Image (spheres, grey):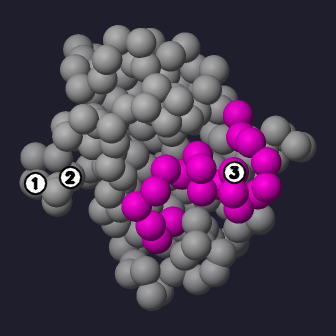
Amino acid sequence: MKPSRHTMPELSQLIALFYDKPEELGQFEEVSAQQTPAPFHQLLAHDEHMTVTVENFHGCKVDVKVLEKRTEGQYYSRKILLTRQSDGKVVQYGIVRLNCDFLDEEPANEIKSERIPLGRVLIEHNVLREVQLTCLWHIRPASELRELMGLEPNETIYGRTALIYCNGEPAVELLEIVTRD
């Protein structure tokens, strides 16, 4: 199943959920998997849940911290951080847009409870899902993103946009940005 033009997550649309201009988050340049250096390649260039990936990479569970949220019709969107349970260090920044029409009420409500990372909710509820990487990004973060992720002034990072199909439907659009350690 390949994303169509109607289901492809658009970077600008995801950023616009919480920012007036994309530059407020950072400068994004599309890159290939081959152009994505370690450890970012390992963390981003795959079709798996980021919750599982960052937990395996960091050797511990992660918690979700919701920074901002909004609901419009069937869409629930949030701007989040994932932090290591071991020491509270931020390991991922994300923007998530969930189409609640494509999820059963129980997992949708658990996601909206903001206590458990989205990937873990989908796994624990055994939702039939397929994660599709759609694009990799080299990012020059703006000040807010640098501060949230504890980055140096000239440090660049990488991220991805992805789509999660739940029960065959395009339910979740994602922007996921990770730290290198």
x and y percentages locating residue 37 in the rendered image: 58, 83
Query: What separation in Å lies between label 1 and label 3 (alpha carbons)?
Result: 32 Å
Determine which of the numbered discs, if any, sits on residue 5 in the image: 1
Say whether residue 179 is magenta: no
Left or right placement of residue 54 versus residue 59 in this view = left
> Where on the picture, by quarter, is residue 148?
top right
Tell me the amino acid under the disc marked 2. Answer: Met
Q: Nearer the viewer, mark 1 or mark 3?
A: 3
Q: Which residues are magenta?
A: 44-63
Within 10 Å of disc 2 (Cα), the crowding (few <14, some 14-19, many 20+) is: some
Residue toward you, 21 or 124: 124
Q: Amino acid at mark 3?
A: Glu
Q: In front here: 31 or 20?
A: 31
**Crowd tier of the residue under label 3, counting other residues whose Cα lies within 10 Å: few below 14, some 14–19, many 20 or above:** some
3D distance between C-alphas at marks 2 and 1: 5 Å
Q: Residue furthest right?
A: 87
Residue annotated with mark 3: 55
Q: The residue tagged with tag 1: helix, strand or loop? A: loop
Would you say 53 lies left or right of 128 here?
Answer: right
Q: In what element is the residue under mark 2?
A: loop
Identify which residue is drawn at 49% across, 36% down: 123
Q: Secondary structure at mark 3?
A: helix
Position in image of residue 177 (x %, y %): 55, 56
Marks 2 and 1 close (CB-CB < 8 Å): yes
